[in-house]
Amino acid sequence: MAEVKLLGKWPCPYVLRARVALQLKKVEYEYLEEELGGKSELLLKSNPVHKKIPVLIHRGRPLCESLIIVQYIDEAWLAAPGLLPASTHDRAFHRFWAAYFDDKLSPLLTRLRNGERGRANEEAAEGVKLLEEAFVRLSEGKGFFGGDEIGYLDITIGCHLGWIRVTERLMGFKLIEEAKVPALAGWAERFCAHEAVQGIMPETEKLMEIFQLAQIHMKRSKR
Amino acid sequence: MAEVKLLGKWPCPYVLRARVALQLKKVEYEYLEEELGGKSELLLKSNPVHKKIPVLIHRGRPLCESLIIVQYIDEAWLAAPGLLPASTHDRAFHRFWAAYFDDKLSPLLTRLRNGERGRANEEAAEGVKLLEEAFVRLSEGKGFFGGDEIGYLDITIGCHLGWIRVTERLMGFKLIEEAKVPALAGWAERFCAHEAVQGIMPETEKLMEIFQLAQIHMKRSKR
């Protein structure tokens, strides 16, 4: 049995967070792809409370919730790079913006994908602008939120870039655009081109297909 | 100017989290009570993104979000007691149950206070049962989730006990009851009697008053 296993589904940005963290730390792991639309016995047994991916199984013990898994990976494999900043104050700030993304911006992107417009458009543009300002402040002229290397906050936001692109296509305009948020646009390109991300970030085309299939499925089940 | 300031409102369980953490670490701080229903200039300036309490200001630098503040306090004042467990695995588990409380159980309690019944009753009872099981596993026969002393998870859940009691009164029955969840009932008593909590946990009577005032206010503004 592999020492480290990860249960996931390829379109899931939360699973991608765990994968990128493991790649950055150069941890060998067995990736177990769950069937889309299904839940394996192992998943139900490993995450009985939420029954959700990702689940990281380390030495037979399961861990759940993507950002808790990323922090666990950072603490369990101490080899560089550190994913959270060394300074107590910076750690709090990275956690703050990660929570902002998950609690505010990510639900907003979901609403936009589901067809909501008007005020939601503006709110998303304002949110992205706030991230641009946060990036300029936290990166201090370096390539990533975490400095020279991808860190906790880069992973948190960056792993959603595939779905952000899907959202942009559906809306017909770009949220992360050079002209409006130049620092964030550069960061997004660097993140996707990083060797820990490149091979596992799902293609926008494929995410679009998955999204459209899910929409059809939802409409049918509403009838 | 005091080195540590905390902006809060007395009925707020999230503010209480920061206060209990500061008390446990024996950090001297200036507590600045915000007006109920208002937001001071200092608050708006210190938390421009969410404009919410609590805000901890340490050496002039503001920090927001209660659980991020508690972790910051744990990391910035290293003197015992440690609020998060020493073991990487246990830390992940404490974070998991803290997120469970904030994301699942706490919104459910709010719905119950606002009059929802039926399935919400059952869900809350199931949630409390899960916490009972988690307590038995994590405390290993000791008095608190964190062992012999109050820790991160105790603070997360315990600071809501005042509002849980308000919810119980409104529902007409107890959620945390000796007969149903004996370990959790004992823990709740110990938590409220702890010297770091005793003087600052708001009385249930006063929270009831605040709740009823807020309800009247809501009904009026709906007219």
Image (cartoon, coloured by chain):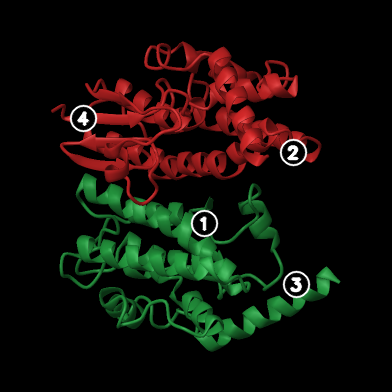
Chain colours: A green, B red
Whole-angstrom CA distance, mark 2 to mark 1, is 32 Å
Tag 2 residue: B120
Whole-angstrom CA distance, mark 3 to mark 1, is 32 Å
Q: Which mark is residue A193?
A: none
Q: Residue furthest bottom?
A: A205
Give the chain of mark 4: B
Tag 3 residue: A218
Q: Earlier in the sequence, mark 3 or mark 1?
A: 1
Give the chain of mark 2: B
Q: Which mark is residue B4?
A: 4
Near-viewer residue (B217 or A189): B217
Give the chain of mark 3: A
Q: Do marks 2 and 3 share a chain?
A: no
Near-viewer residue (A114 or A39): A114
Residue B115: x %, y % from top left: 73, 33
Rate crowding at label 1 as few (under 14), some (14 to 19) or many (20 or more) other CA atoms within 10 Å.
Answer: many
